[in-house]
Amino acid sequence: MPSDWSVGRTLDYIRKVERTRETVYAIYIVDPDTHVLVRSTGLRRLITGEPDDPILSVAPDRAPVTVTPLTDRETLAQTISKYDLLAVPVVDHGKILGIVTIDDIIDTMIEETTEDAHRFGGMEALDEPYMKMSFLAMIKKRGGWLCALFISEMLTANAMQSYEGELQKAIVLTLFIPLIMSSGGNSGSQATSLVIRALALREIGLRDWWRVALRELPTGFVLGAMLGVVGICRIALWQYMGFYDYGPHWPLIAATVGAALVGIVTFGSLSGSMLPFALKRIGFDPASASAPFVATLVDVTGLYFSVALVILRGTLL
């Protein structure tokens, strides 16, 4: 609306054109000569104003929140959420090109969230709803990532092969491989999902990587210590209750499992939190840091067997 209009004239105009508009969330006031956006006001403010008052009198004395045609979808959604808007004008050199409503943003947010969820699950984002995807399209979307993850898991097999001699001497160590590896992968996946979301919401940026590292390092250590205590108690309970005989050196085995859990969960939390930063730094979507990939990254380190060599040397190894 031109800034020299009155409240009454503006309301009369809205009554005439309301049926031709998709929504009437806000009234945008422009300079009558340059058509540059100067203010905006809500319909409630307009209705409560006096008919003879100038329209500028019911508009807040501040520049309206705007976006440009080049604003990306995530930034647009964050802008509407931050300022609790129902619509935001799209401007170019101060002139309104159109508006984006909350309805449009909800659709965008659903698409973005779905895409991130698919990528984090270790697959390409689906182009259509799940039930509408063809069989071949589904294979194509999931097969590539599965093959890549399978090849990367071969590194885990190589890591275990390098400790083949130790495993033959202490077969009991193999009982805890799934337990310890999955704990490291789970902690890494938790950290990755938290950092990906924080990056998406602009709560943190690339420069905050060291702050995240300093936060995840003690967090991972404490979480690992908690799981380590649970693991030690489980071994002791099974030994005393007669559910399984871990041999005369069971306290050392329990200590190995406990220490390995501390190390692997700490490493998983730290590496999982840093992976999205690394991907974003080289230009990839941080959501590509899928949970299976994080688990593989933790598996290939061989921390469990390294801890076992230190604690069990001279006894079982």
Image (spheres, rainbow, N blue to C red):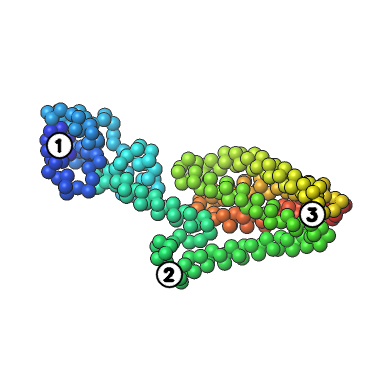
Q: In this view, does 144 lie to the left or right of 112?
A: right
Name the residue tied to disc 3.
244
Residue depicted at x 73% and y 52%: 304
Residue 144 horizontal/vertical position (percent): 52, 66
Residue depicted at x 35% and y 38%: 84
Residue 150 horizontal/vertical position (percent): 60, 65
Tell me the distance, in whole angstroms, between the alpha carbons under discs 2 and 3.
49 Å
Question: In front: mark 1 or mark 3?
Answer: 3
For disc 3, the neighbor class at 10 Å (few under 14, some 14 to 19, many from 20) is few
Q: Is residue 95 left or right of residue 136?
A: left
Q: Earlier in the sequence, mark 2 or mark 1?
A: 1
Question: In front: mark 2 or mark 1?
Answer: 2
Residue 242 horizontal/vertical position (percent): 81, 51
Label pair 1/3, CB-CB below 8 angstroms: no
Name the kind of residue labelled 3 in the image: Tyr
Residue 45 horizontal/vertical position (percent): 22, 31
Name the kind of residue labelled 1 in the image: Leu
For disc 1, the neighbor class at 10 Å (few under 14, some 14 to 19, many from 20) is some
SS for tag 3? loop
Residue depicted at x 51% and y 65%: 142
Question: In front: mark 2 or mark 3?
Answer: 3
Name the residue tied to disc 1.
11
Name the residue tied to disc 2.
134
SS for tag 1? helix
SS for tag 2? loop
Quadrant of the frame with the C terminus: bottom right
Tell me the distance, in whole angstroms, between the alpha carbons under discs 1 and 3.
82 Å
Tell me the distance, in whole angstroms, between the alpha carbons under discs 2 and 1.
52 Å
In which image quadrant can residue 201 be found? top left
Quadrant of the frame with the N terminus: top left
